[in-house]
Image (cartoon, rainbow, N blue to C red):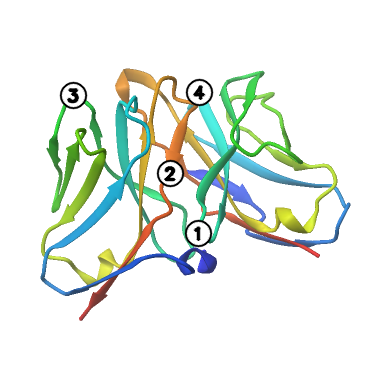
């Protein structure tokens, strides 16, 4: 929704460049991590996930990197396009599925 | 089309007037959940349900109720809404099978309590 953009860190990227969105997670016991994309006026949409026994996973134009040592997660978007403009959330899960914690989000602005 | 449907999309109400936000999914998912989204706070879980007749509190359950009488429906009930419940609400579902734990979200309900 429209209010999501307030108080969010913003990353501005030129169209065609690569984007890197970072996320620090809080729980060293988290075993599953997900990135979601939220466009204005829409609900979050799954992009890519990674389990704690991996440190890298690639999708179509997106790569997620996991560094468990420093509890850091990043989302890399190759050849960023205007349609990539959105708010991106990381989420972590520990134990049972009921406990999924979302980050506060990063707004990606693509400059044409 | 596989989807999670929330209604209404926008709702303005007054303090104390009971309301229900409906959520329905057509993917036969066991897991359903409600979140509220506020500026600077991200998505916070209100209630979740692992299956029919099984519900439990999330991180911010105060002032809300839910029910899960059928697998596809998971309504969110505000018995006596207050202004601090003004927020953007999302329903989500997941099938939890085979390690597939990604959430499918509805389009959201923007609630204003005056």
CA distance separating discs 1 and 3 = 30 Å
Q: Earlier in the sequence, mark 2 or mark 3?
A: 3
Residue B110, position in %: x, y? Answer: 63, 60
- Nearest to N terminus: mark 4 or mark 1: 4
Whether labels 4 and 1 belong to a single chain: the reply is yes
Q: Which residue is mark 2?
A: A102
Label 1 to label 2: alpha-carbon separation? 11 Å
Kindly identify which chain the residue marked by label 2 belongs to. Answer: A
> Do discs 4 and 3 share a chain?
no
Question: Which residue is under mark 1?
Answer: B40
Q: Is residue B69 above or below residue B10?
A: above
Q: Chain of mark 4?
A: B
Which residue corresponds to the image point at 67% horizontal and 43% vertical from the top-left? B22
Front-most of residues B46 and B90: B46
Circles 1 and 3 in contact, beta carbons < 8 Å: no
Residue B5 on image: x %, y %:
56, 46
Q: Quadrant of the C terminus of chain A?
A: bottom left
Residue pointed to by mark 3: A53
């Amino acid at each position: 929704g429209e209010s999501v953009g307030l108080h969010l860190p913003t990353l501005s990227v030129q169209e065609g460049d690569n984007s890197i969105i970072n996320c620090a997670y809080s729980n060293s016991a988290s075993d599953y991590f997900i990135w979601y994309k939220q466009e204005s006026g829409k609900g979050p949409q799954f992009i890519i996930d990674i389990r704690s026994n991996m440190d890298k996973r690639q999708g179509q134009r997106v790569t997620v990197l996991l560094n468990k040592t420093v509890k850091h997660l990043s989302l890399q978007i190759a050849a960023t396009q205007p349609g990539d403009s959105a708010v991106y959330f990381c989420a972590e899960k520990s134990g049972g599925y009921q406990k999924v914690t979302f980050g506060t989000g990063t707004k990606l602005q693509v400059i044409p | 089309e596989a989807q999670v449907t929330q209604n209404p999309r926008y709702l303005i109400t007054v303090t104390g007037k009971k309301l229900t936000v409906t959520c329905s999914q057509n993917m036969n998912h066991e897991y359903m959940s409600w979140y509220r989204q506020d500026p600077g706070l991200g998505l916070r879980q209100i209630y979740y349900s692992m299956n029919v007749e099984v519900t439990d509190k999330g991180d911010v359950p105060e002032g809300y109720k839910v029910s899960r009488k059928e697998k596809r429906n998971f309504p969110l009930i505000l018995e006596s809404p207050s202004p601090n419940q003004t927020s953007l609400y999302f329903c989500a579902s997941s099938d939890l099978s085979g390690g597939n734990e990604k959430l499918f979200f509805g389009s959201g309900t923007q609630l204003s309590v005056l």
